[in-house]
Amino acid sequence: MSELDGAIAVVGMAGRWPGANEPARLWANLAAGERTIASTVEGVTDWDAEFFGISEEEARIIDPQHRLLLECAWEAMESAGHPPGTDSGVTSVFAGCSFPSYLVNNLATDPEVLAAHDELELVLANERDALTSRLAYQLDLRGPSVTVQTFSSTSLVAVHLACQSLLTEESDFALAGAAAIRVPLEPRPGICRSFDAAADGRVIGDGVAVVALKRLADAVADGDHVWCVIRGTAVNNAGSARPGYAAPGMAAQAEVMIEALAAAELSAEDVSYVEAHATGTPQGDAVELGALERAYCPREDTLLLGSCTANLGHLEGASGVTGLIKVASMLHNAFLPPQIDFDTPSPALVAAPSLRVNTEATKWTRGDGPLRAGVSSVGLGGVNAHVVLEEPPQRPVRSAEELAGPHLILLSAKTPAALEEAAVRLRDHLVAEPEVELCDVAYTLQIGRNAFKCRRALLCTDRAHAIELLTTPGPAPDVAESWLAGEAVDWRASHDGRTRLRVPLPTYPFQRRQCWVGPTEER
């Protein structure tokens, strides 16, 4: 059996969080130890409905959670270099969202909305049952579309189900995630002291998080950018062996971690870090620490712990995939961000000497094997999930001849303004990411992006030339005339067998328009 068999690659990531509208910004905030709990998610009150062919009137009654999840699903696929309508194969989606507070607090209190829309219209625009089926319809996804609802563990349970769908070859590409946006939009100030002796309760935050997944063997064969590898997943329920329905169960949390390690065919000591659920409640943190000690200890070394809940607040159903995106960035950069607002270990942490909260920003050093980490998520009602992750495999080393130009850069968008913004974002990306090869940028844009009606083509000799052309528009080269004219072109044949790789690039720049419906007294 190949080491690639049974493993899943995270090939795309997208999201919206307090203080961050993309994973790169989220990672920058986490690496710097920023606290953004009091911030709200941008873009909740507006949306690029026209991009998805949705009328302004319909857009106004669609739950913002559905809106943002649809955008993030598109971005996750596009960031993977497999946008809707290209070569993704059978694509499935597993996702959930929080309580439909937009319907309850905004639409249902507006007589004009109730007079203009019947019950079915409001149901289709707001019911959680419609969440993933609408997404599949808008993106033309043909695999299973399943809404997952397990309270705070929703998105990590969705990852588990997506992995199972891929491993059984039910689907070739999968999206997993969740949205958690509460209306009315209000900053929720506070401090979440995960695992600290002064922890006094959770702080609720808003967020959306989505990952795109493929079988690792397929991702490697297709030259995909792999953020990290999912080695094993597990889901269980605590049953009745706990004080009450809403209480966590230590034994079940430990068991789901052990099961995920077994699925990954790894021992506890193969994992050096765990991204914990860690809501900052004394009881919840004590139970989770006890479960971590049962599953990962005793051990000769120290297991490092952290949780982005302290940075962002508790993101409910979106928390699990947000933690996965954080750890994927950690593995990709071999870097441990600092745990903030942690001063004095809680009694439960003191009682577990093999567990240590990581409070310093530092390089993540490898031992005998690759870097590995766990991600935990705990749902109200007892549904627990755990995922074991590993750093991505090395990408092939190529000769100077393989990397040589010239390179054809293609950009397209649905509007002239979006096309101009796309050029600016690509230019800024090339400046900020000098290690990304221009040949791979060109390849990803040629085969990993949809072709829209507004188009631009640039023939570049090297990176500096590309940055110059993106800054100062020039005439289109003859080689791209057919594409600029709207003809279908298969660019794969133009690479003469040279190794080309998909790389993460700026995603489609949505052009937002106001589509908010407020309560009557606010109108």
Image (cartoon, rainbow, N blue to C red):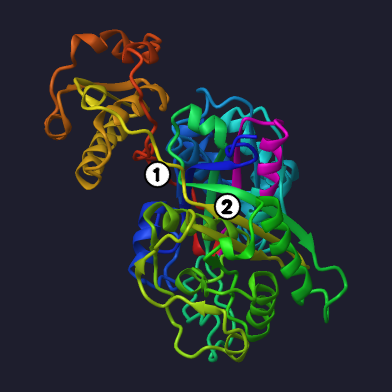
Q: Nearer the viewer, residue 72 or 218?
A: 218
For numbered disc 2, what is the local secondary structure? helix
Q: Is residue 364 within the magenta segment?
A: no
Q: Residue at x 52, y 28 (%)?
A: 84
Q: CA distance from mark 2 to mark 1?
A: 16 Å
Q: Which residue is mark 2?
A: 65
Q: Nearer the viewer, residue 328 or 66?
A: 328
Q: Residue at x 39, y 15 (%)?
A: 492
Kind of residue at badge 2: Gln
Q: Nearer the viewer, residue 473 or 391?
A: 391
Q: Position of residue 462 (x, y in %)?
A: 15, 29
Kind of residue at badge 1: Arg
For numbered disc 1, what is the local secondary structure? loop
Check the picture and name the quadrant holding the N terminus: top right
Give the numbered dot on residue 402: none
Between marks 2 and 1 in the image, the one whose residue lies nearer the viewer: 2
Give the numbered dot on residue 512: 1
Q: Position of residue 218 (x, y in %)?
A: 55, 30
Q: Which residues are magenta?
A: 160-183
For marks 2 and 1 on the same chain, the one whose residue lies earlier in the sequence: 2
